[in-house]
Image: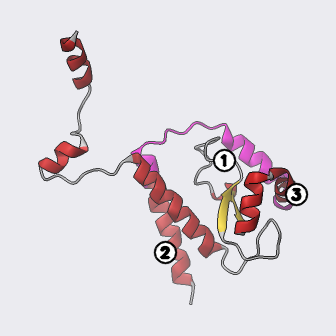
Amino acid sequence: MGNFNQNRLNLGRKALPCHKRRRKGLPAKPALKSLRNKADKLLQIYTRLRYAGVMCYGCGGRPVEVGHHFITKASSSALRYELKNIVPLCNHCHCLIHTQPHLIEPKLCFLMGQEWYDDLMEQRRQLVKTNRMWYETNIEALESMINELTRRQP
């Protein structure tokens, strides 16, 4: 039985695990979680830069501070970094939409329009494999958009 488990664990291993890569002097590949966290932070930075000086889409009275995923990240990987899915909100409305969505979501749907909502619902159904390459591609795209926005600002 021990022999079976040992063979099963070694099947299909091509890349060395991070701890063995470090011993051999090779750079460790970042874990998917760290790539996801980096991409999420870049998305928030992009949102703050893109909507600088714009008022909250929820209340219209405070400046934008955060980008809210209208379709939650857990519901659809395909929409996680889709800019159409990001709604610019102030912190107050962002907390409110998570605790009492019935107060803000109808207003957002009216403001953004039926076509926007239908597009999101269609994209939501798409399956996306969230592997290293997918996160790295999104990170590159977000960094590029951030650089473009920072070049435009005086």
Residue located at (68% from left, 54% from top): 85
**Label located before the other in sequence (2 or 3):** 3
Q: Please report the residue visible at 47 percent of the width from the left and 67 percent of the height from the top.
A: 143
Give the CA distance from mark 3 to mark 1: 19 Å
Q: How is the image coloured?
A: secondary structure
Q: Which residues are magenta?
A: 110-136
Relative vertical location of residue 123 with respect to residue 45 in this rendering, above or below: above
Verify CB contact (< 8 Å) between mark 2 and mark 3.
no
Distance between mark 2 and mark 1 Cα atoms = 26 Å
Q: Circle 2 is placed at which residue position?
A: 147
Circle 1 residue: 72
Residue at disc 2, secondary structure: helix
Specify the farthest residue to the top.
1
In the image, residue 67 lies at what x, y percent?
Answer: 65, 63
Per the picture, the main secondary structure of the magenta-coloured stretch is helix
Q: Amino acid at mark 2?
A: Asn
Name which quarter of the figure residue 58 lies in: bottom right
Q: Is residue 89 visible?
A: no
* Nearer-N-terminus badge (3/1): 1
Furthest toward the left, the residue is 24
3 or 1: mark nearer the eye: 1
In this rendering, the label closer to the viewer, 2 or 3: 3
Q: Which residue is mark 3?
A: 110
Q: What type is the residue that disc 3 sits on?
A: Phe
Measuring from the top left, give residue 79's x and y in whole percent.
62, 48
Q: Pick the quarter of the image with the C terminus.
A: bottom right
Instruction: Look at the picture and state if 60 lies above or below 99.
Output: below
Q: CA distance from mark 2 to mark 3?
A: 32 Å
Q: Nearer the viewer, residue 24 or 147?
A: 24
Question: Label 3 crowding class (10 Å Cα cut-off): few <14, some 14-19, many 20+?
Answer: few
Say if the magenta span includes residue 129: yes
Q: Crowdedness of circle 2 by 10 Å Cα count: few (<14), some, many (20+)?
A: few
